[in-house]
Amino acid sequence: MSQFIESIKVEDKEIFLLEQHQKRVNDTFANFGKDEAINLENIFKNLEHDEDGLYKLKITYDLTGNVRTQMIPYAISEISDFKLVENNSYDYSFKFEDRKELEKMMILSKASEIIIVKNNHITDTSFSNLLFKKGKDWFTPNTYLLNGVQRQHLLKSKKIKEAEITLQNLNEYSHFQIINAMNDFDDMFIYPLERIKNLPSRPDAIEL
């Protein structure tokens, strides 16, 4: 049976974006014909977590209600280099625990992190959504693989906008950053576009 995961930010005993995480869990159960989803708030309360600091609460579950939890101390770190990787068939509509295809792409890339290109469009990294800066504004690709909770939150609060971002117009952006449940919209880790190792200098000179 398929296993799914939720990685939830917990800082100083406070849980973040719980409503968005619960909706994703509910949608996952509903998509596979199950009526009663697991309750993330109850799971967190039953952990009786009383430590200050930043943690990732990793919840692994299946559609029968089996749950496994891990509370992992978390530190955000800088990524040294990125590489564009083409995969036109990869699908990650639900947050599956199985990441074999992502791990394979990572190994073949020989980079610290990958940016997956699907049908000529920028999607996500192996573990996050992306934001790209043009002028003073930040945009997220409308061709995401997974509509992450942080992405939804930032769009709803109008801090970012959606855009069609392709290999051909990528050079119109100056900087980028990664976002996920653990990584908020943050000026600390903004990368220049040149951090992408195989960034095409011209649309007709793309080498993935």
Image (tube, grey):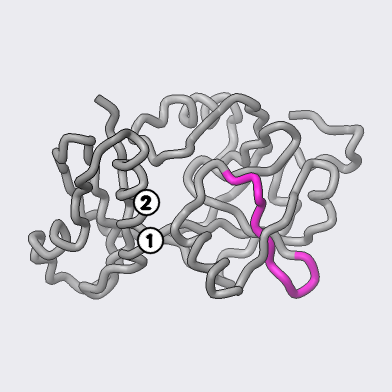
Q: Is residue 138 magenta?
A: yes
* Residue 151 - label: none
* Bounds of the magenta segment: 134-144
Q: Quadrant of residue 130?
A: bottom right
Circle 2 residues within 10 Å: few <14, some 14–19, many ≥20? some
**Whole-percent x and y of residue 78?**
52, 57
Task: Name the spot of residue 47 as percent of width and height, x first.
Answer: 10, 60
At 36% from the left edge and 66% from the top edge, which residue is drawn? 17
Q: Is residue 172 magenta-colored?
A: no
**Amino acid type, mark 2:** Arg
Q: Residue at x 14, y 57 (%)?
A: 43
Image position of 111 with respect to 107: above or below = below
Give the structural element (helix, strand or loop) at label 2.
helix
Q: Residue at x 89, y 38 (%)?
A: 203
Residue 94 found in image quarter: top left
Instruction: Name the foreground residue: 174 vs 111.
Output: 174
Q: Are marks 1 and 2 in contact (CB under 8 Å)?
A: yes
Residue 24 tag number: 2
